[in-house]
Amino acid sequence: MNSLQAFVARHRFLLGFVLLTSTAGISVGLAKVTTSLYALSLGASATSFGLIAGAQSIGILFMSLAVGVMVDQYGPGRLFRIGCVLVGLVYLAVPLFASVPWLLACTALVSFVMPLRFVSLNTVFMQQLERVGEAKAGWFRGSHMLGMFLLGPVLAAGLVEWIGFAASYWLIGATFVAAVLLAPLVFGPARYRADAPRSLSWRELRGQLALLADDASLRDVSVIEFVGGAVHMYYSFFIVAIAVHGFGLGASHAAGLISVQGAFYIAALFVLGAGLPRLGEARFYLAGFTLASAGLLLIGLAHAPAWLWLGAPLLGLGLGIQQIANLARFARIGARLGRGKVAGLMALVGPAGGLFGSVAGGVLGELFGLQPLFLCFVPCFLWFAWRVLARRDAVLVQGV
């Protein structure tokens, strides 16, 4: 018992963080799937369905930088609690009017207040990563995605069938509000303090964006994060259509390709982080780029379903390794440039890449076909690998 108490005391922040982020992920996963099912039940057209899907991200693009400033101005704990309550209230209001425009408006509103939650979490985790170690860099994203992509969707379908849409949204709203009760596990011991006082203004937002132009390291990791988000979203959106129409797989088997890729991605985030300090950043990145490129080649050149089933886990592992390195690198840059600033940018570039992957992929897929577009991402990872090797060689030449 004493050893268990010692373990809990030693890892109090990390255990609390995993509990909070996995719970938050379950709430988001429940909301996303329930919203999709609700839109279908309301008879939403293909256009309306696409608008609702896009509305889940649009506010994130506008608010991430602003929330990054507000984190330094007001503190992440306060913003997280406000975000939880506001998101919960919006979801409680969804069943008030059974109409597609109302659902679209509520979905868009949620996307504008959701950054209050995850930018705050990003900021605190970057601060604490110095203490818990870079080997745990993937635990933040892994615990959130475990709830959002695996546990939440599984629960959503059964919940809607059991209690209906209205009660499901009331429960979703309640879970967001209830996350306030778990906040002290993370924000209590963190004691976040901004590196410099900041206040929300256009000048501050422009300065935050200017960091991308001024800091080469931040720019490099942001581009990698953008492309990784684009690949991940493109795969999630279009692999089912490719598997069904191109290879004749049933809907359940096609959806299984998403689960396999997601499972290996999450497993990499939790398990492979120990390889970062052992291999070093350069070799760790190269392993991720190599695995992701191999997965993309198998999927893009596939002539049989077996190629897809081989490519999916390789892509998941590669993107997971890349994500671990990105998070650790963002944390180091945040310690140098300001965690609130970098957390806002980190929350922006990933979703922006995801939006690009879904929209541009759909447009270009109409022209060139969906499957060959996977090959278009391979040169990006080859370029990233060349950049990593060039930077490592430069460091060796300088004798650093």
Image (tube, grey):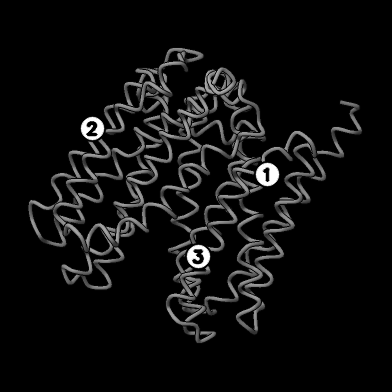
- Residue at image location 45% in from the left, 28% down from the top: 16
Which of the two discs, 2 and 1, sits closer to the camera? 1
Badge 1 crowding class, 10 Å Cα cut-off, few under 14, some 14 to 19, many 20 or more, is some
Q: State whether residue 73 is above or below residue 367.
A: above
Q: Mark 3 — residue?
A: 258
First in residue order: circle 2 vs circle 3: 2
Badge 3 crowding class, 10 Å Cα cut-off, few under 14, some 14 to 19, many 20 or more, is many
Rendered location of residue 75, percent (x, y): 38, 18
Kind of residue sitting beneath label 2: Val
314 or 23, which lies in front? 23
Horizontal placement of 345 versus 320: left or right? left
First in residue order: circle 3 vs circle 1: 3
First in residue order: circle 2 vs circle 1: 2
Q: State whether residue 62 is above or below residue 159.
A: above
Determine the CA span between mark 2 and mark 3: 31 Å
Determine the CA span between mark 2 and mark 1: 35 Å
Q: Residue 85 carries which label?
A: 2
- Residue at image location 67% in from the left, 61% down from the top: 314
Q: State whether residue 150 is above or below residue 176.
A: below
Quarter of the image holding residue 396?
A: top right
Rendered location of residue 357, percent (x, y): 49, 60
The number of numbered badges drawn on the structure is 3
Rendered location of residue 69, percent (x, y): 40, 25
Kind of residue sitting beneath label 3: Ile
Kind of residue sitting beneath label 1: Leu
Q: Which mark is residue 272?
A: 1
Determine the CA span between mark 3 and mark 1: 20 Å
107 or 324, which lies in front? 324
SS at mark 1? helix
SS at mark 3? helix
SS at mark 2? helix
